Every structure is written in structure tokens, then in C-alpha cells.
Amino acid sequence: MAGDAQDIPRLELEAVIGFNGHVFSGLRVHPGREHFIYPLGCTVILKSLKDGKQEFLHGHTNNVSCVTVSKSGRYIASGQVTFMGFKADLIIWDYEKRAIHARLQLHKAKVEGLAFSPNDKYLVSLGGQDDGSIVVWSLESKEAICGSPASAHSAGHCLTIEYTNHSDNIFISAGNGTMRVWELDLPNRKIRPTECQTGQLKRIVKCIEIPDDDLFFYCGTTSGDILKVNLKTRLLNSCGPRKQKFSKGVNTLKVLKSGDILVGSGDGMFTLCSGPNFKTIKKVQLEGGVTSIAVRGEGHQFFAGTEAAQIYRFGYTDFKEELIATSHNSAVNDVAFPFGSSELFATCSQDDIRVWHAETSKELLRISVPNMTLPVSGLLQVRVWEILQGCHRLIETMKEHKATVTSIKIKSNDKECVTASSDGACIIWDLVRFVRNQMVLANTLFRSVCYHPEEYQIITSGTDRKIGYWEVYDGSAIRELEGSLSGAINGMHISQSGQHFVTGGDEKLVKVWDYSEGEVTHVGVGHSGSITSVTISSDNGSMVSTSVDGAVLRWRYPHPSSP
């Protein structure tokens, strides 16, 4: 009954709210100047700078760990993480076709970094710390040319890689106590490294930036300073700033045409400093550590991405920050549309509740509640409140559940409600006398419960992967569906007509079901974390699902004629 996702119609994904700010240099601007490119979960998103329209590159099987764009703009490359012992995919995308050009596999567990050669001949990839190798790939043959361990045995892990601007044969790698310039020897299919001499200086390099002339390159370090190295002699030229280092390390660098340098640091400071002496010219404090800087065109406009999942826009002349995209940076626990409206919806996560405009995905309101996970879990009781003008009053507390209450639904006449709990019980309560009317028991941790619109049946879901239909009157079981092939079903919502309902859970799929047939009609693929909640809009035009990776996805609802 859970249905094989292959032969079931796909849901149309309309919009994604989310940005993984933990991927270093993950935010890119396409050389065509029209699109952002950035990762979220296992998806690479292309977003128009003009109208905000999104396109999605689906192909990764786990979280995207790095993204890069070729100089010509013809190709995008993205790498992913995978499980220990398995090989991590690296995908080269054809930008024009929005399709996979090549899927390559060699690195174990994680692809740490990627860089295209200046003339689109090669792609160089760096494996994560469990892999530790560098591989050069041919874009034409879609095969590996050669590979090598990224750093010497005496050095630490390599963390970043970058191609020079003029030669297809020279690239640079750097990391913990390692900084190397590599030359590709194509006839012998070898890459040969030369160590860069930094004297007594021992640094962990997080990022590399190479100005257009290829004379020098800059390295940002975890110590909060920048190293300037001569590319020809491989010798350290200078290091700075001497006194006021960048707090919590330099995460990302960009050299502008003027020679000035944009610096993003771990404490959220976005700085413009002079090239020769690294002196600060202008600086702005942003929310969350700065992990990406993307320059548009000649550098008249640039963008910063932070760990708090925010994207900011700057103009070179005024250097004023403008917040252009926000998203949750931790698990989203729940989503709800207001009664009778489909224009807005609200989501809640660890520290805040946010209200969004559905059509534009713009954040309209944020209510911050620090150090308190919303909704409050861990309550074993059901509390009934009266909401008055400007205040609220506790009317009654109903205690019968032995574990966390995970879901509450109230009957349309406000005289009855049903609660689902991790104790394996669903209780139907009388809200006039505040006593239990009926109880449903199952060998599961219940996660969700819904009233059928006619309110004579309820449906439940939980950790046993089953969807249960129950009579409200006497609590008897009517039927049971196999709701998922793997993991719990965490969220469920039923349409206003009761003809369809939607589920989501650890399987990471959004499923639309026919209520009476008990069959899946549509499947939505897009989440890369477990789905926490799902809801249908009041006008039956769309659905919204949320997940543990902070993503909020909006789908076109496939049965608009039958609500």
C-alpha cells in the first residue's frame, strides 16, 4: 500500500524556503549575472536574481557538501556526503539544459571541494578527511585523468582547492599545515605538487582566493589572518592584519578588481579591507558566521551567505547590507495555515516562530523565544486555555497520557478534541466535562492524528509506519494501511472534503493518498531530511512540508477540484 515511488505521479515543487549556510562558499552567482546557485539538503537551487523564480537540480542522494561554477558558466559541479565506506557522488551539471552532464564517483564518504579549470577542460575534486585524495577529471571524456594524496603524511587534512585563472594545468590546495601548488602533467597522467614555504608560520587554511593576474594568491586562516603567497616562487609574501585579527577565523575571501579584499569571518563580520596591508576600510556585522561571498559582474554588487541561513546583498559604493533571503537554520517542527486563509502560513523551530507570505516565500514576521523548542514537547498532559483580549487563562488540565503528547486536533464545534501521544494511546476528550470519552491503543509511538471532516472517524500515524483509521464513537479499528517503506510517519493532514490526505516522515517523501481507496495518488521528492509536518492550504491550491534540515517546501496540490 505504501506504493513504489517510481511509477506514481510526482508532485510539482513550487518553491523552497531554505539555504544551507554551513557549506563554505556554497552561495555562487552565475557568470551570466542572472542567477544565484546554492545548496539545500540534496538539492542544488538556481534562483533568479530578477524575479526570485527557482529551478531545482535533483540528483544527489545525500546532503550537498560543495558547489562551484565554471568560468564560462557552462557547467556547475556539486559534491555530496555519504555514509562511511561508500563512495560519494560528484555531479557535473549542464547549466543550459539544467541536466546532468556527468556523475562521477571515486572519493570515499565526502567531496570536500571542487574547482573547474579556466577553459572548462578539467574539474579537480578534493575528498574529505576519510578520503584525503585529489582527483583531476576530464570534462570531455567524463573520466578521471589522475589522482594523488592531497597532503604529505606529516601534514594535516587538506580543506580547500582552487584553480588558477589562466592555466588549465595549475591549481592550489591548502588546509591544516599544508599549502601546495600542483601542476598537471597530462602526457604522463600525473599531478606534481610543490610545497609553499611559509617559514615558521603554522596555519590552518580555510579558503583560497586567486586574483585575475595569477601573480599571488591569498589564504584565509582559522587564526583570523590572511596569508599572501607568491604563486611563481611559492614563497610567503606577507601576512596580516598584524594587530586586529578577524575574530573566529577567515571563512571566505574575494579579491575585487580594485585590489581590495572582501573578508567573511566566523563572528559574522563582513569586512572590506585594503589589498596591500589588510587594513579595514569598511565593515558590517551580520547574523551568523559569514561562510560565502559571491560577486556579481565586475564587483559593483556582492552577496554574503551566513550560518544563520541568511543571504545579504551589498552595493560597493554604500556598503549597506540588505537582507534578501531568510530561512530556518535548524529543524522546523510544525507548519500551519491560518483558518480560512491561504496567503500566509507559519512555521516554528527551536528558537522562533516565523510567518511567511506563501506566494513570494518572504518572511513577514519573526517571534523569537530563545532557549525554548517550539512546539513545547515533553508535556504529558493536555491543557485547555481560554484566550482573552491581551491575556489567557488556564481552564483545565487533563492528565492521562504517560508520555509526550505529539498532536492535538479540536472538533469543529469545540466540544471535543483528540490527542496523540508517544505512549501508544490516542484519547478523545470531552471539552465540556473535561473527561475522556474514548481511547485508542496501538503498539506504536503516535506522531499525528486527524479528524475526518465529517468527524465520525480519525486517522493516526506513528513509528510503526502504519496509517490507522478508527471510529470516534467506540474507538474500534476500521482499517490499517502500510504508510511508509522505512521510518516513522511524523506529519499528516486531511483535505476539507475528506477525499484525500497527505503524509510525510522519515522516508523523506510527501505522499498524497485517496482516503477511501487507501492508495497513494502522488509522491513529492525534494526533502533530504526527515519530514516533520505537512499541511494543505485552505484553498486547496498548495501544500507545505517542513523537515529537520530547516527546509520548508511548497508543492502544488494535485486535487484542486476535489478539496
Image (spheres, rainbow, N blue to C red):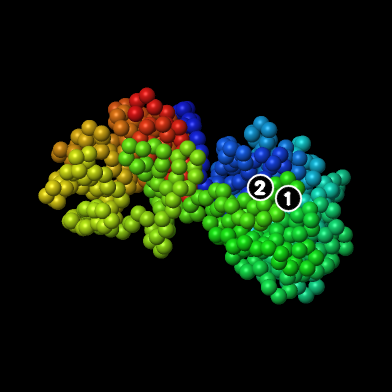
N-terminal-most mark, 2 or 1:
2
The spot of residue 215 in percent (x, y) is 85, 57
Residue displayed at 21% across by 35% down = 455
Which quadrant holds residue 233? bottom right
The spot of residue 426 in percent (x, y) is 23, 46
Dot 2: what SS?
Answer: strand
Which quadrant holds residue 90? top right
Instruction: Specify few, some or many for label 1: CA neighbours under 10 Å numbering under 14, 14-19, or 20 or more.
Output: some
* Residue 410 visible to the viewer: yes
Instruction: Specify few, some or many for label 2: CA neighbours under 10 Å numbering under 14, 14-19, or 20 or more.
Output: many
Instruction: Classify residue 169 as left or right of residue 510.
Output: right
Residue displayed at 39% across by 37% down = 342
Type of the residue with mark 2 = Arg
Question: Are dots 2 and 1 in contact, CB under 8 Å?
Answer: no
Above or below, 165 relative to 287: above
Dot 1: what SS?
Answer: loop
Q: Choose between 369 and 389: the one closer to the eye.
A: 389
Type of the residue with mark 1 = Gly
| Residue designated by label 2 | 28
| Residue designated by label 1 | 299
